[in-house]
Image: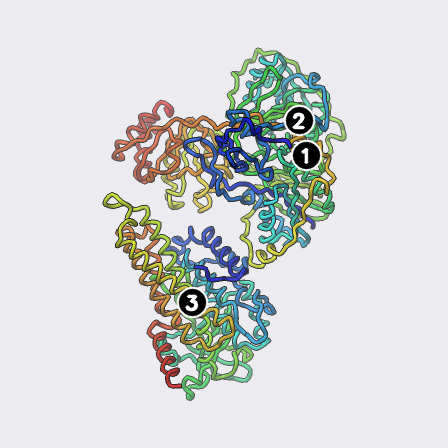
Amino acid sequence: MPIKIILEKCSGCSLCVKACPFNAIRILDKKAVIDLNKCNLCGACVSACKFKAILLEKTTTLASTINLDEYQGIWVFAEQKNSIIQPVVWELLAKARELSQKLKTQVSAVLIGNRVKEKAKELIHYGADKVYLVENEKLTNFLDEPYTEILVRLIRKYKPEIFLCGATSIGRALVSRIAVKLYTGLTADCTGLDIDLEKRLLLQTRPAFGGNIMATIITPSYRPQMATVRHKVFSALPKDINRQGQIIEENPLEKELKSRSQILEIVEEVSATVNLAEADIIVSGGRGLCSKENFAVIEDLAKVLNAAVGASRAAVDSGWMPYSHQVGQTGKTVAPKIYFACGISGQIQHLVGMQSSKIIVAINKDPEAPIFKVATYGIVGDLFAVIPALTKKFKEILKR
Amino acid sequence: MNIIVCIKQVPETTEVKINPQTNTLIREGVKSIINPFDMYAIEEAIRLKEKYTGKTTVITMGPPQAEEAIREALAMGIDEGILVTDRSFAGSDTWATSYTLSQAILKISVFDLIICGKQASDGDTAQVGPGISAHLDIPQVTYVKRIREVNQGFASVERMTEEGYEVISVSLPCLFTVVKEINEPRLPSLRGLLRAKQAKILKWSAKDLGLDEKKIGLNGSPTQVVKIFTPAARPQGMIFHGETAEVVEKLAEALKKEIV
Amino acid sequence: MDYLLTEQQKLLQQLCRQIAEEKIAKAAKDFDAKEEFPWDIIKILAQSDLFAIYIPQEYGGVLALDENKNVGGVLDLCVVTEELSRACGGVAVCYAASALGTFPIILYGNEEQKKKYLPDLASGKKLAAFALTEPEAGSDASAIKTTATKEKDYYALNGIKHFITNGGEAQVYVVVAMTDKTKGPRGASAFIVEKGTPGFSFGKKEDKLGIRASVTRELIFDNCKVPATNLLGKEGLGFIVTMKTFDISRPGVAAQALGIAQGALDLALKYTKQREQFGKTISSFQGIQWMLADMATQIEAARALIYSVARMIDSGNTSVSKESAMAKLFASDVAMKVTTDAVQLFGGYGYMRDYPIEKYMRDAKITQIYEGTNQIQRNIIALQLIKEMAK
């Protein structure tokens, strides 16, 4: 039995009952009882118990045993598109540098593509000590199989203890595949990375249940410890063109270049409005707008502020804004400097997509709307009066 | 065409609320639903079957109650359902989950296509789909927003990217993870509901699948949760009251330094 | 109240509730404003097999009929219509009117006609409509002037029908016309006429007070040649077909009224619990509570009556004219009263089109008028009572 209650220590206080995300614990005769059919062994109850009355044990027979000491160094996947290194990579390099100082080890970047050699220097300027460079015409654009095979081989060869990657559409598909092939642990969308020096482990913190709880995860027995991180979670270091480093060229093997999928065409759909993920300011509209025509009010404010336009699921489902503008659990997650939530009630699925914004401004006619609980500033009022007035005001201030 | 759809039963997060006093999740009476992204996978499988004829199978790894999710999928129009369930699966991370599911798929043995939703709304990792294709060593295309054609052992699809999309040709069998843009999931039909009620659902345990017990459940999972905590709540904000002109003035003043 | 619905009926009810909540409710205001036929919703209803519930299995439907019965699924039809009406009475009538145009074929169609038309109606690929009313023939149905003159192997239809629900959108029409003026009411016959038949065109679309999602049009027959094989039953059966069809379809109209009433009550209950005046929620006041109690009781009585009549019909009882007239009369009057009271409970907000409740009152009114005005229903009931007395 991997989990059990130490009855002598259990006081029946029911803290564990409240902590359990799966409703698996109840109090019977003043003692906690765990329903093993519902228990997911997540350990939330263990953390919550003040009396240390819950024991969660893992057996030590592992499917594969490796010598952890052989693994050194932090690797960052340098995702490139059209030979341009993606901005999340600079942020990962900065974090890797911070972690490497604690571990007293080196930071390396892995760059795969075609004719990207000059970019390798850039990676060094942003914090890499080494760059592993793999070039081939067939690797110009990301393909799941070749990139996976190459990285698996290089990881097995060089044995990094930590592997970081941007949580982009490429990154997530890629590392999920690598982690399985290498039989190692992968934590997605980390919002925090730290080191447990005593055990020399990477502490990976990420949200779960739509951001309602945070979990810290470790990969104790397997290597490398893999994690993906979203753009704008960490900050990049300033570029230092004097930084020196090593570029190691690795040739791909013929069999690694084989791919059972081919890119036939790349289509760019340029949105007229500012890219949501990159925007510093987002003005978002929800059900309160009532119609597609009314969204003009949101667009006007966004224009004055040079902001991107966002929308809640309700607005997208009603056809007032295209899906590419949707913010929330099934849309995009954004973390701008300022997020205006206009006529948005603030249901959990929306909050999940924007609650990390630095400043949240809520404008809603319902004073009970949940959005006001997360808002930095709020106005209870008719958005059709407030927003145009706000637009006018900002126009004056910004002289636009 | 033989299509397998992997789904997950998750709590309906609209219902998940935080207890304001203890700052923990309130889960009483929270409904379980099919992971929203998986609905798109189910719909796409049914559409492919309608277009190319064939058989669709839905499979899920979960506790006994996950059988409801399978019946829901059958009511929409999936032909057959399999529940992979065993106490020893508890505590599985994405590695162990994708291992378990891939072994179940190998037991089904005949398939041209595996379709998964992009990610699950409780874990949000998006790792299981690609994990399955890695275990099975088949090609994968993630973020599929449209399946253009399936023809003579190849599929051509549109893969959504941050800038637009790519058109990809991939050999079968392969795995797709699909995004919301791919279709509009249908509601169940009466005939489907009646059929789903009567349907016999296969149940496979760890033993039925001949799984390596070192690779499943808590023990087989390379990752481990060491701590769960509630995130620091955002500090209480400032609500402005008054006439429109007044509140607009106050808000603009507060935001001025951030915007200029 | 537990009406002891069958397993299938319960599933149907849940399914329709889901459709109503997820697909219809949010679009109802839009449908009302735009007055456009809700084809997207019809497609969803079709895909969920809702058009198949009253059509026998051998013709593509879901209905399993015992040998001695030729009609069934009426309670299922009522359950569906009520659930859809809670969200939008207009959308519900697009659905129910197709049933109205289908029942004549189920009751009086021969094998060829059933095989030809029912499968497409069951799958929702085609919609049906029933055409009786004319500018000069409303309650006085026998005053219809549209003629059907026999020529060799076809009938030439000439005349105008108006206020036809689903007119222009449906593909299959059951049209009642005079084949022999000398025989009075026994000179009318019913025909199946397909959209697109030369000589069959559509006139203006009516601009209605309520049920605006439903499309109401004029049908114009100008020497429209209808194949003789499309005659339903025999010449002279026209009004019999009509009466027997109405006997079965009236519970459906009643269910529509019921759904509208229930939807209005639900909204009113919610509102009275939120709205505060004099320091309390208005639901705390006895006057308000009594209104709500009366509304709920009337609704439940209507439901019980409708379901009982529907069960009578499903069990094979063919002599249901009085009962089905009672159900329609009662439910529609209840709907009008309940929706008016609901608007009253909303106070000033009830009068504002920004709020959803006024639509329910506008939608309810028609249920007292169509498929036989409530005055005609009273005639039917009274005549039947007197006939029974005389025995």
Residue at 26% across, 54% down: C287
Using the image, tell me which numbered label, if any, was put on residue A114: 2
Residue at 66% across, 43% down: B84
Dot 3 falls on which chain?
A: C
Do the residues indicated by labels 3 and 1 lie within the same chain of the protein? no
Q: Residues within 10 Å of mark 1 (few under 14, many from 20)?
A: many
Note whether B71 is above or below B92 in the view shown: below
Asked if disc 1 and disc 2 are in contact, CB closer than 8 Å, the reply is no
Work out how far the residue at label 3 is from the one at label 2, CA to CA, in angstroms.
74 Å
Work out how far the residue at label 1 is from the one at label 2, CA to CA, in angstroms.
40 Å
The colouring scheme, among rainbow, by chain, secondary structure or one colour, is rainbow
Task: Answer whether residue A143 is visible to the viewer in this image.
Answer: no
Location of residue A75 in the rendering, given as x and y in whole percent from the top left corner: 63, 20
Q: Nearer the viewer, mark 3 or mark 2?
A: 3
Dot 2 falls on which chain?
A: A
Note whether A132 is above or below B243 in the view shown: above
